[in-house]
Image: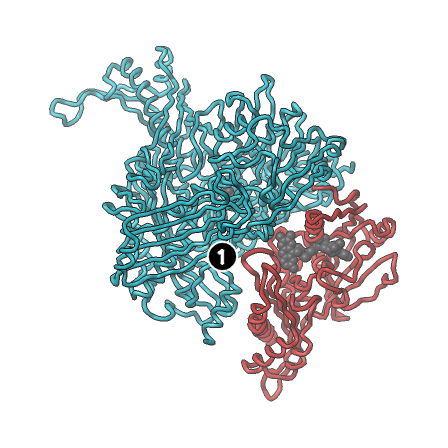
Chain colours: A cyan, B red
């Protein structure tokens, strides 16, 4: 093996490398520098960026030997004498880190820029970071972090730096730790590259797994022969369905998804066999030696065909053919409603499949412990569900399985289903060695569930004055080969298909269908992203036809306290939509849309660019709802050193849950935020926090943490009460101290006498000495909800949002650019304004992708979009100016009034953009994403007509 | 990833590099930045082929090959085969005297790829829409192809267009031959050049349309008229495309709106844009051709004044 000499982070090293190895691999595997991340291995994502002789390169396609004699800098080299590099510090403080998987690459690319150009313009920053994708932050905080470093370097004694801290939206006065903008507690680990994602774990004697995927999107399996693969040197196990001892299928709701296919394959990503071998290369070579004989079956590639009576049956698990679920929403009298309408708008909309494109591809490691238990390391959104499904397929009790959550490099709903978890458990058992299964980007793109493609036929009826009287919708959702969360997602699409408006008569039929496309499941927005596009487009068309201001039309019909949703739920509280509309409207008032003209330009630039605003509103449930028990358990333990730990198996996918839990715990225990540790997602050590989905964790696990901490505080208060000789009501926990207040004076106006004080640590010691519990566990059950179709509340809370987008269309090329987005979001209560800002910005930019850049294409069951180079998520170049308002209409359910924010911000942006395009050039887009090719041709057709 | 090659050589001289190619006799392949090659290999692998080379011959450390140099006497700028897009973008010489190339290399990918990918690799890859190749086409670029194994090994230069056999098909056999350098005619007095391209926000990172122009102005009847002009575009043909008839039409004319409109019509009659799946329709490209022509011509003329 050739010897590679290079200087890595200031140290000269010599390392033996294979001639075909890449630098990323050498850094990670041979030098243990796992801070350099691998997100795609196709030079697209930038996660693997390092500096070679000062210049940023993507190390995943950089032959290692090219670095001979070079100076290589990685994220690990930035910390000097335990002090963070200014960029690292700024990323932490500005909230430019969420899941953190993109962070090392972004920081290295930024360093490469600043080393050569200490004073870059915004444009130069965007140009330098264009090929570093971040799926979480929306880049706004990234830009502000870099600019703050530039500013602080230039600041001298005479001219103090402008502003080093991020601009936060205005929120309420914090209550102790709750409401404060603490930087993430895992941010330092993420900016230094020490945070461990699944692929960063290594075990002695570890093997590498690989999965044989289906050759056809739909075929009968006639024969599988693994003999040759097994004979390949270095192969340790080759398993097929025959080697699955327990449940042959898995599934979050319905057990309809084969662990390893036995009768048929139903989509290109179906797993047919798995291999464990000494290296990944050998495992992949072994796949080619597995012989599978198929009989091809006809394909169904869209939900409308799937519903036809003569359609080939894809999956009959439920006994009703390709129909996964028919969802009906029925309110009032739809016939009567339309009879009363003065204006009826009826349109058909299409949304394509979308890919989550989280930066970290799926990875799982399975291992058998000395006691014979199974351990699985994985970045999963639902650790306890993983445990249940692994145990079922291995036919062992759940107590014999431990799921340990690693850091998760983004999820957005795409890491809820089983991918490699069961496979690594099976392989580990078969080989009695640890087995790592890391998906390539291609595999990730083919295999995991996507956002449903939909066709939505929407009919909206209104009175002349704009009062909505009826909404009728038919929705066809492509759920792909397996159920995943398809029926839940489509239920949400259906129940939200009348929009955040009070409509007396609603009838919706929604069909979630099995097809031969990749399964569709959860994806931020959970079905509402799709229906909101249709609803808000129809609203604008209606406004125009009626000659009413589109904002006014929404205000008139907005859900507010006292109105009922389309499922008949009475809104009793916490309905901030009107306030959101008002805030956005006043911000854009100077640009207000003119109504009634053919083309509603606000102004025309001298060039060929036309600009206009578009508006949209949305709502989204918080919590599972629909009658599903929604619970979470959290445990608080306090220690003699005055610290506390909060535990729950609730996944952090970048959204900032650890801070929420730590802030709540710190607030309740009256100790500084820094003294609270957070332990998440270990099924042995942390109680079940339920799934990270439906924007529920802040509300549900937040409450569990609140009550657990409160319970703990009460125990401590009793201990303090005795020692400090005061009744428990007079014991106060604050700033790390426990005070016994003197009694109120008889008149009730002040207290007589002095305060007796102990440190929090002392009180913990007293409690322990008295054999009191120092741990408290609380199972929180969210208020009961009712299934769709039964009277009562389907959800315990809703978040609301209004957004306006300023869009520029180039009339010569059809190119569309979002210049500015004004957002107002009702989140009940901002627990951490910094994290909230990140969720809103990230949501908006993701939704710009939904409108303009993203489309996952499958042709006849064959995935065309099988690499990142064919799926463009928004880059830093797409980032608009974002003005964000927070509305805090408290919910009586969530902790301190908080509701969910993870999804709502990413819903209204698409229709706001689409409406703006219409206002700019008079072309209505009915099919996402906007196709500039088609847009230009339609613009030209309009002018020639 | 499977092993696509066995050995990796980084020769220090052109002669060593040629010697290695000769020794491997067709079983080795030239690599520059690798930003096309390595991804192509991966793609071939996924589509079922099993590409494999006994060795890669890395030409980025060949002595002198990383230089951009002006041969003022002969009127050329010469770019060695190790010169990256980033170097070209940073070169004030290129920016001033070959603005189209500066602009083209400036839009190639992102910072990382520009630090790795070479201009010669962009040309060797032979895609009709490769950005720097489109710009080089109007700069009268020529390449030098060296080999120990074939008759082409000479100090002779040949026109860049002669390398293009079809989309992604180069006349240069990168298992036996090395493009050692590219040279082109920088713009001088009364001359200017420009490059523009349109991308699609979805899907493949290949341009929908790229176009470059180089103009030389002369004063006629106290007005600026086009003395000479070169226009290239891609992809509008299977190979690198020069709009010969449009150029011919424009020569001697004063550039005004009417002339541009007529020129666009000529361009549409000679360019052959096609529909490429998931990228652009023919109709869209037809709409864009006049727009782009106006864009590059206006900019180039402005620079020439
Ligand atoms: C993410 C990404 C984005 C990109 N964006 C763009 C873009 O916007 N515009 C664009 O035009 N390109 C783009 N590219 C393509 C690529 O970066 C360029 O074409 C680059 O210039 C290729 O140069 P290279 O040195 O990397 O070539 P290599 O990959 O090393 O080689 C390419 C081909 O040429 C051969 N070759 C290389 N050097 C020589 C030589 N001296 N003699 C003979 N044969 C040789 C190789 O054998 C190979 O066949 C992109 C690539 C990536 C990965
Ligand atoms: S660019 Fe290297 S891992 Fe994505
Ligand atoms: S923080 Fe950037 S991808 Fe998650």
Residue B41 vs A659, above or below: the answer is below
**Residue B75 visible in the picture:** yes
Residue A10 vs A116, above or below: the answer is above
Return the residue found at the far front: A310
Residue A161 pos. (x, y %): 43, 48
The residue that disc 1 covers is A929
Q: Where the N terminus of chain A falls, by quadrant?
A: top right
Which secondary structure lies at badge 1? loop
Chain letter of mark 1 equals A
Residue A335 pos. (x, y %): 29, 55
Residue A686 vs A552, above or below: the answer is above
Q: Residue at x 22, y 20 (%)?
A: A754
Return the residue found at the far left: A747
**Residue A151 visible in the picture:** no
Q: Where the C terminus of chain A falls, by quadrant?
A: bottom left
Q: Residue at x 69, y 29 (%)?
A: A237
Residue A941 pos. (x, y %): 48, 72
Return the residue found at the far top: A770
State the residue in front, A164 or A934.
A934
Q: Is residue A528 left or right of residue B24?
A: left
Residue B78 pos. (x, y %): 74, 63
> Which corner quadrant of the image does residue A632 belong to?
top left
**Badge 1: residue crowd in 10 Å (few <14, some 14–19, many ≥20):** many
> Which corner quadrant of the image does residue A273 belong to?
top right
Q: Is residue B55 left or right of residue A932?
A: right
State the residue in front, B63 or A181.
A181
Q: Is the residue at mark 1 in contact range of ligand 1, meaning its CB lies under 8 Å from it?
A: no
């Amino acid at each position: 093996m050739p010897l590679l000499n290079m200087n890595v982070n200031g140290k000269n090293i010599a390392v033996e490398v294979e001639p075909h190895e890449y630098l990323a691999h050498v850094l990670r595997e041979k030098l243990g520098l796992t801070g350099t991340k691998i997100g795609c291995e196709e030079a697209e994502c930038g996660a693997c960026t390092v500096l070679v002789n000062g210049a940023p390169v993507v190390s995943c396609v950089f032959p290692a030997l090219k670095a001979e004699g070079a100076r290589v800098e990685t994220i690990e080299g930035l910390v000097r004498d335990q002090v963070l590099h200014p960029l690292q510090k700024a990323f932490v403080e500005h909230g430019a880190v969420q899941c953190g998987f993109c962070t090392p690459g972004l920081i290295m690319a930024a360093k490469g820029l600043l080393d050569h150009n200490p004073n870059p313009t915004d444009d130069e920053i965007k140009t330098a970071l264009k090929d570093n994708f971040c799926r979480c932050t929306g880049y706004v905080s990234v830009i502000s972090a870099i600019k703050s470093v530039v500013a602080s370097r230039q600041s001298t004694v005479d001219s103090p730096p402008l502003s080093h801290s991020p601009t936060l939206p205005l929120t309420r006065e914090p209550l102790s730790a709750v409401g404060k903008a603490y930087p993430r507690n895992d941010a330092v680990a993420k900016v230094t590259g020490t945070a461990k994602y699944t692929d960063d774990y290594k075990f002695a004697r570890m093997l590498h797994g690989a999965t044989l995927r289906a050759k056809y999107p739909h075929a009968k399996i006639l024969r599988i022969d693994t003999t040759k693969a097994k004979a390949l040197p270095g192969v340790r196990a080759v398993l097929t369905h025959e080697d699955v001892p327990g449940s042959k299928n898995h599934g979050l709701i319905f057990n309809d998804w084969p662990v390893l296919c036995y009768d048929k394959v139903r989509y290109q990503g179906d797993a047919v066999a798995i291999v464990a071998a000494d290296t990944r290369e050998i495992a992949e070579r072994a796949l080619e030696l597995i012989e599978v004989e198929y009989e091809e079956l006809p394909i169904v590639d869209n939900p409308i065909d799937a519903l036809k009576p003569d359609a080939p049956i894809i999956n009959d698990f439920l006994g009703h053919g390709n129909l996964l679920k028919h969802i009906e929403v029925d309110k009032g009298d739809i016939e009567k409603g339309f009879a009363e309408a003065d204006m009826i708008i009826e349109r058909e909309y299409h949304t394509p499949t979308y890919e989550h494109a989280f930066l970290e591809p799926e990875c799982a490691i399975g291992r058998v412990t000395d006691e014979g238990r199974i351990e699985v390391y994985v970045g999963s959104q639902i650790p306890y569900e993983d445990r249940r499904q692994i145990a079922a397929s291995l036919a062992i009790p759940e107590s014999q399985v431990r799921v340990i959550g690693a850091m998760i490099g983004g999820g957005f709903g795409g890491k809820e289903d089983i991918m490699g978890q069961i496979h690594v458990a099976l392989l580990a058992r078969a080989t009695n060695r640890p087995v790592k299964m890391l998906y390539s980007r291609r595999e990730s793109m083919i295999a995991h569930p996507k956002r449903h493609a939909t066709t939505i036929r929407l009919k909206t009826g209104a009175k002349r004055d704009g009062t909505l009287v009826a909404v009728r919708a038919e929705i066809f959702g492509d759920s792909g080969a397996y159920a995943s969360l398809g029926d839940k997602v489509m239920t949400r699409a259906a129940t939200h298909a009348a929009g955040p408006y009070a409509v007396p008569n609603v009838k919706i039929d929604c069909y979630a269908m099995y097809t031969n496309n990749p399964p569709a499941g959860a994806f931020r927005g959970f079905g509402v992203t799709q229906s909101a596009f249709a609803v808000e487009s129809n609203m604008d068309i209606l406004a125009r036809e009626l000659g009413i201001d589109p904002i006014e039309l929404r205000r008139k019909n907005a859900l507010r306290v006292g109105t009922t949703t389309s499922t008949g739920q009475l809104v009793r509280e916490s309905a901030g939509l009107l306030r959101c509309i008002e805030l956005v409207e006043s911000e854009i008032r100077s640009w207000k849309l003119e109504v009634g003209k053919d083309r509603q330009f606000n102004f025309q630039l001298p060039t060929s660019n036309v600009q206009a605003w578009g508006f949209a509103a949305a709502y989204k449930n918080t919590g599972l709802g629909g009658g599903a028990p929604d619970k979470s358990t959290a445990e608080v333990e306090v220690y003699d050193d005055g610290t506390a730990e909060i535990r729950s198996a609730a996944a952090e996918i970048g959204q900032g849950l650890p801070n929420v839990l730590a802030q709540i715990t710190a607030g309740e225990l009256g100790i500084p935020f820094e003294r609270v540790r957070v332990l998440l997602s270990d099924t042995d050590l942390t109680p079940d926090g339920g799934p990270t989905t439906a924007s529920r964790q802040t509300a549900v696990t937040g409450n569990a943490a609140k009550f657990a901490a409160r319970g703990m505080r009460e125990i401590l208060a009793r201990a303090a009460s005795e020692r400090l000789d005061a009744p428990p009501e007079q014991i106060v926990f604050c700033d790390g101290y426990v005070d016994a207040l003197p009694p109120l004076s008889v008149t009730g106006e002040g207290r007589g006498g002095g305060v007796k004080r102990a440190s929090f640590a002392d009180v913990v010691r007293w409690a322990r000495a008295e054999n009191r519990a120092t741990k408290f566990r609380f199972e929180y059950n969210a208020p009961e909800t009712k299934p769709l179709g039964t009277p009562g509340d389907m959800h315990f809370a809703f978040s609301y949002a209004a957004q306006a987008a300023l869009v520029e269309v180039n009339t010569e090329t059809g190119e569309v650019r979002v210049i500015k987005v004004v957002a107002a979001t009702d989140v009940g209560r901002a627990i951490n304004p910094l994290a909230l800002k990140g969720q809103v910005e990230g949501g908006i930019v993701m939704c710009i992708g939904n409108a303009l850049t993203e489309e996952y294409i499958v042709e006849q069951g064959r995935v065309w979009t099988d690499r990142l180079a064919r799926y463009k998520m928004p880059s830093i170049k797409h980032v608009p100016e974002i003005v964000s308002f927070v509305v805090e209409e408290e919910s009586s359910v969530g902790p301190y009034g908080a509701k969910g924010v993870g999804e709502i911000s990413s819903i209204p942006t698409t229709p706001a953009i689409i409406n703006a395009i219409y206002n700019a050039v008079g072309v209505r887009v009915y099919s996402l994403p906007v196709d500039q090719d088609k847009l230009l041709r339609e613009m030209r057709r309009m002018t020639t007509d | 990833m499977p092993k696509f090659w066995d050995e990796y050589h980084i020769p220090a001289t052109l002669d060593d590099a040629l010697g290695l190619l000769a020794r491997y006799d067709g079983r080795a392949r030239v690599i520059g930045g690798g930003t096309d090659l390595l991804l192509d290999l991966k793609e071939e692998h996924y589509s079922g082929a099993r590409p494999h080379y006994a060795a890669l011959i890395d030409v980025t450390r060949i002595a002198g090959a990383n230089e951009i140099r002006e041969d003022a006497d002969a009127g050329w700028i010469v770019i060695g085969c190790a010169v990256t897009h980033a170097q070209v973008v940073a070169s004030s010489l290129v920016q001033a005297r070959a603005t189209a190339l500066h602009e083209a290399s400036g839009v190639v990918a992102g910072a990382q790829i520009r630090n790795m990918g070479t201009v010669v690799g962009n040309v060797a890859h032979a895609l009709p829409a490769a950005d720097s190749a489109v710009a080089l086409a109007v700069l009268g670029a020529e390449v030098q192809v060296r080999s120990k194994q074939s008759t082409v090994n000479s100090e002779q230069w040949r026109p860049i267009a002669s390398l293009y056999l079809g989309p992604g098909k180069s006349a240069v056999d990168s298992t036996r031959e090395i493009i050692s350098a590219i040279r082109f005619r920088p713009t001088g007095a009364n001359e200017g050049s420009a490059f523009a391209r349109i991308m699609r926000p979805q899907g493949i990172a290949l341009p929908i349309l790229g176009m470059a122009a180089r103009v030389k102005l002369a004063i006629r009847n106290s007005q600026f008229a086009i003395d000479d002009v070169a226009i290239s575009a891609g992809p509008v043909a299977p190979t690198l495309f020069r709009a010969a008839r449009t150029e011919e039409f424009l020569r001697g004319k004063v550039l005004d709106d009417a002339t541009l409109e007529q020129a666009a019509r000529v361009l549409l009659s000679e360019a052959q844009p096609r529909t490429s799946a998931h990228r652009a329709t023919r109709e869209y490209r037809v709409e864009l051709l006049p727009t782009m022509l106006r864009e590059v011509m206006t900019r180039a003329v402005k620079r020439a004044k």
